[in-house]
Image (spheres, rainbow, N blue to C red):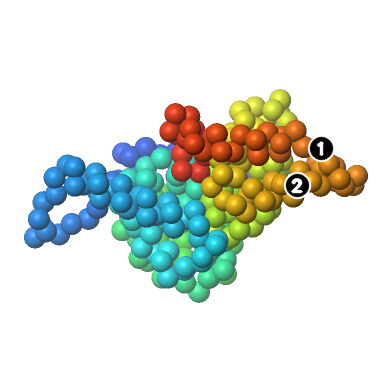
Amino acid sequence: MLSIVCVAAVSAALAAGPDDGGSKPSGDTPAASDDAPKQSVQERIAERDRLEKKGVEFMTHYYEHPDPDGVAQIVKDLSASGWLREGRNQADLLGFLVPIFRAHPDRVAGWMEQWGDLPDDHLIALVMAVWISKIEGGDEIMMGQVKNLDESWTGNVVGYTEEEPWDPLTMAEPKAYQLELLWGWYCGSGDERCLERMLFFTGDARKFDNLAEEATTSLSYNAAVHPSVRKWCERELKKEKTDPEHALAQAEQLEGILEDADYIYENREALKLSDFGFPRD
């Protein structure tokens, strides 16, 4: 059971607005030295768009072409672009980093030091990724970031060291932004348990309310983006129809997910979907 401190930290870290991040300014402007030529508004917007596109592309296809050497800079770029101002995007990145931290535990301390000057609301989400990853030495790494955070965040970091981290792959009851965590996790690892969990949430609209609809939409969207997701849906649908021991009973959802995939992706702007197929904040 999460303490009040940790629940508050989840809410603040994954839903903070651009001015809610403590003492450091929010990262929506690429850093520049005093001697650098000043950019016009159009140039700054173009640079932020470039950094965002580069970062999202890196995340989306990481599991196909893992590149741990590029992780540190991509996180900085996403922060500078302003992409991390949205709570959903912070959750995507948090989920993305957890399997990467687990795959490269010896590099996490160094990465966190490189990210120490990011805005507080961005940095606390990265601290949460260390917490959820449960890597050896994680508590020391998290406490090492206290010096980089406004003191108002210290209780949150201490709370992480005292609580058992939750696991988006196994939680029976969904938490805020759990779907985003799952998609980030999938992109960082290719772990099909993320897809299984996503499909689970499509199955009972009465229980999960709008979560079921969001899970269905995001699966359709990502089936168009990722051939691996489409193939997984097709395999699961075949099991539904041919394997009498396959008891998910979600053939109808899978058929709809596959049927709607191309339409949802092609109309993502009109539907106001995020880079991972969720309603934008």
Task: Tell me if 39 is positioned left or right of 217 in this view.
Answer: left
Residue 2 spot, x, y in % from top left = 60, 45
Q: Which mark is residue 249?
A: 1
Q: Nearer the viewer, residue 117 or 183?
A: 183
Residue type for callout 2 = Glu
What residue is shown at x 46% (from left), y 39% (from top)? 274
Task: Tell me if 253 is positioned left or right of 32 in this view.
Answer: right
| Residue to which mark 2 is pinned | 236
Please tell me whether mark 1 sits on a helix, a strand or a loop: loop
Q: Nearer the viewer, residue 243 or 18?
A: 243
| Residue 170 versus residue 201 in the image, above or below | below
Q: Is residue 90 visible?
A: yes
Residue 12 spot, x, y in % from top left = 44, 41
What residue is shown at x 43% (from left), y 54% (from top)? 57
Classify the position of the N terminus by image quarter.
Answer: top right
Task: Tell me if 82 is positioned left or right of 223 in this view.
Answer: left
What residue is shown at x 37% (from left), y 45% (from top)? 83
- Judged from this view, the residue extending furthest toward the right is 244
